[in-house]
Each structure stands twice: as structure tokens, then as C-alpha cells.
Amino acid sequence: MTKLRLAIVGAGPAGIYAADILLKAERKFDVSIDLFDQLPAPYGLVRYGVAPDHPRIKGIITALRDVLDRGDIRIFGNVHFGTDLTLDDLKRHYHAVIFATGAVRDADLDLPGIDAAGSLGAADFVSWYDGHPDVPREWSLDAESVAVVGNGNVALDVARMLAKHAEDLLPTEIPENVYQGLWDSRVTDVHVFGRRGPAQVKFTPLELRELGELRDVDMVVYDEDFDYDEAAQAAIASNKQVMVIDRVLQSWRQRPSVNNAGGEASRRLHLHFYAKPVEVRTDADGAAVAFVYERTRPDGQGGVVGTGERREVPVGQVYRAVGYFGSPLPGVPFDKRHGVIPNHEGQVLRKDSNERVPGVYATGWIKRGPVGLIGHTKSDAMETIRHLINDQGSWWNPDDPSEQAVVDLLASRGVSWTDLEGWHRLDQHEISLGAPHERARIKVVDRDEMVAVSTGA
């Protein structure tokens, strides 16, 4: 039976699903899979990109854990691709590689003043409140009024975390430094800006409902945003998700806080629709002091056009939440414009050509861009795996495909990698930290501490 030694770089949902699909579907080959990740713990953006007060989404981890706990996939955490392990190394020890590294940095927003002090990336903020080991432990929340630019789920996550009271996050796995940072927050008003109307938003009804459930936070909407044109009315009538979103927003219009009047909460979350970003206005020291936008209006076809009317809202911070973007990998083709590895259905292509790169594949957000939910990730992985299986004739011919070879290689380079048993240690350690406080867990944030716990040092 043909032996397939496969490396997968990225231990988030995309990488784990790809491994699981191959192991369940393939009967022609004797398959052996090694999963590499630069973080000491697995699960990628499910652990480091989902707000801690989303237990239902975090439930995805249970399914991922079941896959890993079967024991037929080896994990090598705390391994940096490009330094600890290179593409040439993989060619020497594997028949093929799948890159599933996702998209973890903020997409650019081309605005005057966007580089001002106080102008921040939503992805960086998410990494901070999720306890990512490679971001600073401190996050300044000393502005009373802040802007969040975007109308997707990440924008609402960021807005909710900024507006929510720290003590309401205690039942979650929020790291201690994040709890203290949110406790010290001076934020009282969070303004969310989207250039289109309420019927064209990109967030889901679940995300929107959760905003309205925040304790001691008034939801502020504006009557001028609900003069729907025929296209918006048609979208509400024909799309159940849009209908539910409209129903939630209309219910908020009945609250005393509508149009910024009469609310009694200590914090407010404002939703501004038909607001096209124009500028982050700064003071003489280069610090953000206001968010400037152009009022738009419906174009009758589901889009918007500018009105020429400019407005500004005083803010001390601006969070851009206009999407994630992939990062290049050493030795691997990369499309700088779209932030993905160029590919055809997961088969990696050489830059600026349609010529395939033998043995190299991609799946997940680094393959298709940061769009779609978990269901898309599974179907995405199935497509890539199908090509991998059919491409047997173009696999690499490794010098030493033995399972011990990569272990010896990492050891010779002094890499302190973590394995599945180590993740179990860290997992139980975090749960034990939370137990005395009746919390789900308290995340360990420091990378060295994560590795020490994982390796039993």
C-alpha cells in the first residue's frame, strides 16, 4: 500500500478538518499526518479569534477536540514555519503539504489619518482580549468615545466587548490581564459605522441580538436610517435573515434611547448606517480626535451613493473592522492584492501564472479569503483533499519520510514543541485556574508559561 506522509501547517478548524476528511475518506493510501502550528495550543481562530462570551461558537472546539483525541494525528505546536521548519525541510520528510494558516491581520482601510495614534486594528484588539501570546498584555481604553468601522460580525464583537462591563465577562475564559484592562476602561460610548443601510449589513441576527442583551448599555439607533427604499423593502420581504435583523432594529426604535434621547444606562452603543468613512481627524500631536463620515443614501438597487453631506463624531479611538487579511509564508507563492495563496481549488499555483506547484496545497481562509462559516471550511477542505488524492503522481519524493525524522530535526534545532499530551496538560491547567473562581477557565497568556505547562517543565 502506498504511504502518504502529509504535513499540514495550521492547527485551526481548516487544518484539523482537512486531516479528518483525509483519514476518514482515504483507503488507497496508508496515511500519516503531522499538524504544525506556531502557537503552543491548537484550534486557531476558534481559540484566538472568537469573543470569550460566545460559548455557543466555542462549542466547535468540542468537535475539533474529538478529532485530535483519536490519536491518529500528531501535533507539533510552538513551531514557526520558515524558521523552525522550512519548505525545504518538508520536501525532505513529506510527500505533500497543506497550508491552513488562515487570515489573522487586519485588512487595510485607506483613509486620511488612519495611522493616527488611537487608530487601531480590530484583529489586534481581538487577539488581545482572547489572550494571544504574541500581542502586548496591555491595551489602552482611556477614551470615553470610540468608533468601530465596519458592519460585519467582527465589528459587532469588538463593539460589544468595548461596551460590556468587565464583571459580566467573569463567567467566561477571559484572561486576567484582559479583565483588569476592561475593568479600568473609560469607554462610555461606542459608535459603529457602516456605509450601507440596515438591510445590507453583513452581521448575523445572533450577533445583533446579543448587543441588545448587554446589561446597563443603551442601544442607540436613528430614525433617519429607516426610511427604506423599494430595494431594502424587497430584501426584508424575501430574506429571512434580513427580516429578523430588521425586526430587532425596529424593536430598538421603541426604546427611550432612540435618536440618543432618554436612555438611562451608563454606557451607550450607537449604530450609524449610511455612513461612509472619510477621515480620522487628528490634533496637533497626531492623536485621533474625531471620526468624519459622509452621509450616503440608497441608490435604488441595494447599494448607496454619496450625498456630499459630511458629519463628524468626537472619538479618542478608531477601530477598523473591515475584514481580515492573509500573511505571506516563506517560499510559498502569495497574492498580495487578495491576501491569499494563489490556487485552483486548493492546488497552489505559481505567482502570476496558472502553473501548479507540485506537492503544495491550501485550504481555509488562506485559500479563499476570510469569508464563510465553519460549513464552508469543511467543504473547502474536501475540495483540496480530493485534488491531493488524485495528484499522487506529482507528490514529492522525500529523502526520509520516517515519522522519527521530523522529531529529530526539531530536536537538533532546539525547538521546544508541544504535542497532544501537552495540550491536555495546558487545557486542564487553565480549567483548574478558573475552578476556584467558578469560571470556565482562565487562559494562560505567556508563551513560555504555555510551553512550560505543556511540556511538564
Image: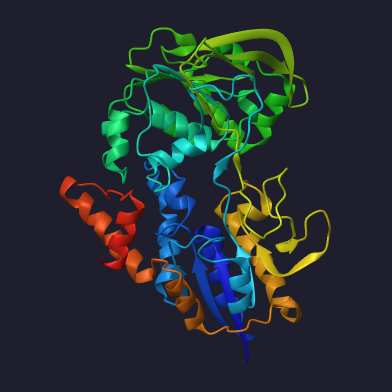
- Asked if one can make out residue 394 in the rendered structure from this viewpoint, the answer is yes
Closer-to-camera residue (430/380): 430
Query: x, y (%) of residue 204?
Result: 54, 37
Quadrant of the rendered structure where residue 212 is?
Answer: top left
Q: Report the front residue among 313 and 438.
A: 313
State the residue at coordinates (48%, 38%): 124
Count of marks, rendered view: 0
Residue drawn at 65 percent across, 29 percent down: 200
The structure residue drawn at horizontal position 72% and vertical position 49%, both measured from the top left corner, is: 335
| Residue 72 visible to an observer of this rendering | no
Residue 409 spot, x, y in % from top left: 49, 75
Please state if 377 lies on the left or on the right of 191 as rendered.
Answer: right
Quadrant in which residue 395 is drawn: bottom right
Point 53% across, 75% down: residue: 33
Q: Where is residue 328 in the image (x, y as percent from the top left)?
A: 63, 51
With respect to residue 183, does 136 lie above or below? below
**Colouring mode (rainbow / by chain / secondary structure / one colour):** rainbow
The residue positioned farthest toward the left in the image shown: 436
In the picture, measured across the screen, residue 394 lies left or right of residue 445, that is right
Up the image or down, 36 lies above or below 305; here it is below
Q: Quadrant of the N terminus?
A: bottom right
Q: Nearer the viewer, residue 81 or 317?
A: 81
Q: Where is residue 6 in the image (x, y as percent from the top left)?
A: 59, 75
Q: Is residue 428 left or right of residue 54?
A: left
Task: In the displayed orientation, state which residue is furthest to the bottom.
Answer: 1
Image height check: is 313 above or below 135? above
Q: What is the quadrant of the C terminus in the image? A: bottom left
Question: Which quadrant holds residue 229?
Answer: top right
